[in-house]
Image (cartoon, grey):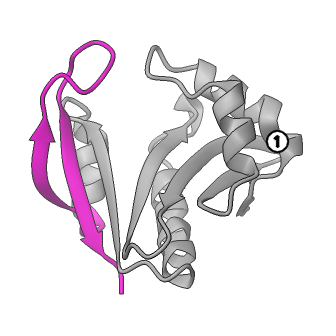
């Protein structure tokens, strides 16, 4: 089940984020974004456990939404969870008036790049040294309207 996150999900969001080695969102960031109209956090829940989440940021008056984070628990990877979550993200972004979604993804994350390409996200640039370990980021965009 995919649903909007609530403050009750804060501990689960932080636990899921802690699985990954770097560039993590803090508890404080999640807490702040859960309260903002300019952000949407969706969770993918299975058997009562949050196994994935997405964070999308919006700017008033901008046609672009920014997928700030998309995390899938390692045991749930390869099962279509990210794809389902992205389709829901696109639907929510459309309902908020977005025409495009943009994101950055590690240039060495070949599985994520393949998924985004499959779903119609197109590269439009790279940012050198973007991540904490200085890995470059590939910038992607998709027209959703």
Q: Is residue 74 magenta?
A: no
Could you say where residue 11 lies in the image, as x and y percent from the top left? 81, 29
Q: Secondary structure at mark 1?
A: helix
Q: Quadrant of residue 129?
A: top left
Q: Residue furthest right?
A: 8
Q: Residue furthest front?
A: 61
Q: Which residues are magenta?
A: 118-145
Could you say where residue 67 lies in the image, as x and y percent from the top left? 43, 53
Residue pictured at 49% horizontal, 81% vertical: 94
Horizontally, residue 33 falls left or right of residue 90, namely right
Q: Quadrant of the N terminus?
A: bottom right
Residue pictured at 43% horizontal, 78% vertical: 98
Question: Viewer-proximal residue, 23 or 33?
Answer: 33
Residue pictured at 29% horizontal, 44% vertical: 104
Relative to 135, is 52 above or below? below
Could you say where residue 4 lies in the image, as x and y percent from the top left? 73, 60
Question: Viewer-proximal residue, 30 or 17?
Answer: 30
Mark 1, residue position: 9
Q: Quadrant of the C terminus?
A: bottom left
Relative to 111, is 16 above or below? above
């Amino acid at each position: 089940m995919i649903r909007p996150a609530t403050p009750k999900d804060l501990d689960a969001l932080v636990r899921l984020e802690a699985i990954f080695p770097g560039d993590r969102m803090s508890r404080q960031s999640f807490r702040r974004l859960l309260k903002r109209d300019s952000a949407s956090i969706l969770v993918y829940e299975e058997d009562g456990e949050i196994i994935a989440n997405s964070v999308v940021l919006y700017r008033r008056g901008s046609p672009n939404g920014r997928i700030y984070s998309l995390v899938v628990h390692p045991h749930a990877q390869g099962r279509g969870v990210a794809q389902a979550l992205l389709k829901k993200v696109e639907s929510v972004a459309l309902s908020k008036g977005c025409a495009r979604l943009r994101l950055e993804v590690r240039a060495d994350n070949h599985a994520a790049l393949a998924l985004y390409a499959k779903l119609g996200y197109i590269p439009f640039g790279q940012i050198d040294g973007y991540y904490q370990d200085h890995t470059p980021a590939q910038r992607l965009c998709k027209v959703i309207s």
